[in-house]
Amino acid sequence: MGRRARRPLGRHPDGPREEPLSVARVVIPEPRRRWPVYAAGIVVVALLALSVLSGFVIDLLWFREVGFSSVFWTILRTKIGLGVAFGLLFFVLLYANLLIVRWLAPSYRVLTREEELLERYRMAFEPYLRWLLPLFAAVLALFVGIGAAPQWRTFLLWRNAGGVAFGSPIPPGDPLFHRDPAFYVFTLPWLEFLQGWLFSALVGVFVIAGVGHYLWGGIRPNAVAEKVTPQVKAHLSVLLGLIVLVKAWGYYLGQFDLLTSPRGVVAGASYTDVKAQLPALRLLVVIAVVCALLFLVNIWRRGWALPVVGLGLLAMVSIIVGAAIPAGVQRFSVAPQEQQRERPYIRYNIAFTRRAFDLDRVAVQERDVAASVTPEEIDANRVTIENIRLWRPEVLRENFQTLQRIRQYYEFHDVDVDRYVLGGERRVVMVAAREVSQDGIPAGGQTWQNRHLVYTHGFGAVVAQVNTATPEGTPLFTLRDIPPVGEPALSQPRVYYGEGRDVPFVVVGTGSPELDYEGAPGGGERRFSYDGEGGIEVGGFFRRLLFAWRYRDVNLLISGLIRPDSRVMIYRDIRERAVRAAPFLQFDGDPYAAIVDGRIVWIWDAYTTTSSYPYSQPIDIDEVVGNDQAFELHGTANYVRNSVKVVIDAYDGTMTYYVSDPEDPIVQVWRRAFPELFTDLSEAPPELRAHFRYPEDLFRVQAAQFANYHVTNPDEFYRKQDFWAIPPDPTIPANAPEVAPGEERPSGPLRPYYVLMRLPGGTEEEFVLILPFVPEGRQNMVAWMAARSDPERYGELVAYQFPTGRNVDGPTQVFAEMRQDPRFSAQQTLLGQVGSRVLFGDFLPIPLGRSILYVQPVYVRSEQEAAIPQLKFVLAVSGGGVGLGSTLAEAVSDAVGAAVPEPGEEGPPPEGTVAERIAQLLEQAATHFQAADEALRAGDLATYQREIEAARAAVEQARELAGEGTPEAAPTPSP
């Protein structure tokens, strides 16, 4: 027979009394030996507290510095609130069930031999369960709360969305449930999180309760008679009923997900979703509710037959009705007549996709196109021709690095296109800020003081014309050198905040003056003491301790050069800075520098996106844009808006988040959540708004969608008979190095490009972003699209479609014609024989009136180490005629057969007399020669070559000013 459970410990029922279980002796240390343990514990706790405090306090101080402390507190309160709420809810749910498990434990039970050991352990822990059970529940609740905190974005969108509406392209709401898209974007994600969390929590509690009942003897799988006590059965039945009831809620919410279903021809609820999947989900809701009731009824019945039947029915219906029947409807009802079945749903998809990507605002015009550019069109579009961009950003950056870096501790991270009024004329130029690079400090000067206190900022910017070059093929600058010479004028040229960051912090206002810039050899160094508002005041010992611990740098704590009023500048990378203040936005892949009122500012476009907009076709942004950072525009989305433009001052780090699309409902909700963060665009100064441009990432996404969604007829859309594509960039494979046999050359789509041009029907030139289209699977051009950037008509989109049957050569065809031109082929062969490599710039189809002018810059790079690409040729095509010249005007004249005057070389005004300017250039050359000598002594041949090239360029400019022509060879320093 079995044995009674509650027998005295150590007494065997069938034999003599056993010896009691031995208990290990615990040796308690003498009091005098405990202090190392206590000291180690205190140190560990102190270090943990210091880590938490350093992160918390310094982040709070930084948010106060930038004026957005409310953002910090709102996010923190929301995270803590969610963590506490869901953690507490789970604790109550779990602890209550654990108490029920103990309460339902049978007082007496017959033990099998296998259960004896388990019983001993249970009895050993019994005295400690009063605090072990709540501790166990609290530990799990802590992890559950931490897991809920990341849902702060979802919660804030739901919490602040009251009254916000998108409006529907097909009023009054979506065609299936007649709800505004706001429900799917703001409310549904929060409800689905609640349902998923509650389902997971109940399943977890059920499993833990089941294990508890087993440990306390309520469940005995090996028992001959009753394996589960009636009380335990009732408890588990209630839990299972609740789980199935929450599952029914999931089925109910699942019907709304049909509006983003990928099942049909297009995204959104398809014929099968509406006619088969939706009824199946509604049936599953009913069956799940019935199953939940069966579990409750099962409390008063013996066995588990009734709920098992219900669960089996639910599983069977889920498989048959939820999967098999919809698959059958799709195969046998939809597939044979798919166009007719899906026609209304394609119409919904077209309407909602065009609204989601702002394509319903695109003004489509049909424009005839002439065979070739006429002299009259050349004359009427002279401003456009004079602003065609010949410099590829990557190539120009190499030139900037060699010719305008000046010192090795400066760096140009990027070159961007913008427009300025120079010499009374509006010109397209390319701009780059000269930033500091502590990694470029000479090897002997790589000290902590130099890296963090002395080399704190960059200096100035470089501006170059886009449409021309010097006779040597280098850029023609309008702003250059240190101190800056030329226009646009810079009154505050210092760059403390930029795109690069070699060290996590710099300290300004210290006892060590900052290096402003170095003058010519013998001219000494210029020192500077920061007087702006950027940075966090060091304060007293406690703050210094927190900074030192945060950055693991004891020098912050012990350096005597740092004063209480010194400022620590952190998050100087503008990307990190802007994202930290608004982590709920996505950002463009290319922030750009602009010179506004004599100061350098950074402008960065930010986006609001969602993948929950009903009936809208999602797009893989990574495939279209190719951004590689988590905070940049990426992922899959079916709604995108450029809702915010972030402006960051390069001197003091001030950030302003201008709402550029106040009609976007998502940014409206975020503005409710963070009212102090955002500023109306109307408050932006006109000088700043003049440099806002339509973002390239957004335009690429819109163009990729418009390639299909310019078709608005559902039948034509289904047949895909007029789908377009973005043409491939023919220069990518042409510039790629040779590949092994069998390998494919790299390829990619043509990038949009900024142009100052007069749109068809317009009266004056505008700064626009344009991109051509070709038919899907073909090479001829059929249309082009433009986005306006000027303040008066910012954001307007227009597409120009060529008449049907008109054959216009596309980029691939024209590029092939250029390369086959005998004169260019001969030049390319000759250059290859002398050890130079030909590189192609951006391929540019430029609309001029009723014609298309194709322009292809060509660079030549010597095979010598550290040689820079130089602009040597320009190819132009119009009407099949290929023009070749050393300048744009020569190439266009050759292609069109009409004289095109050279653009005026608007260089920077000379400083003082010609003799003074020559002296300045010779000083620059001497500086470069000195740097070349230092590099040669250090064995850095690449730097040596760059400095020599820069010195030669300065000497050549000086001789041109002196009227001596171009020298045969510039002097070089002796090794």
Image (cartoon, rainbow, N blue to C red):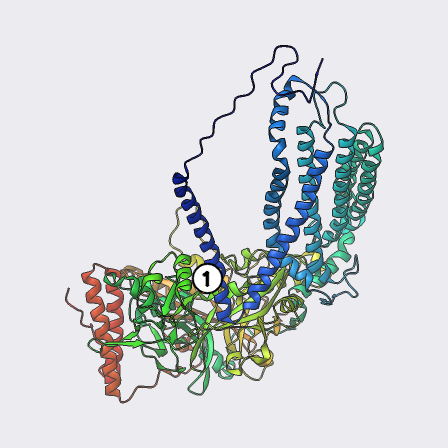
Most distant residue in the top direction:
15
Most distant residue in the front direction:
31
Residue 389 in percent (x, y) is at 44, 73
Asked if 394 appears above or below 134 in the picture, the reply is below
Q: Determine if residue 834 is in view.
A: yes
Q: Quadrant of residue 564?
A: bottom left
| Residue marked by disc 1 | 816
Total numbered labels:
1
Residue 815 in percent (x, y) is at 46, 64
Name the one closer to the observer, 152 or 863: 152
Q: Is residue 356 left or right of residue 481?
A: right
Name the one closer to the observer, 118 or 791: 118
Asked if 132 appears above or below 790 in the picture, the reply is above
Q: Quadrant of residue 330?
A: top right
Asked if 339 appears above or below 69 in the picture, the reply is above
The quarter in which the N terminus is drawn is: top right
Q: Quadrant of residue 327?
A: top right
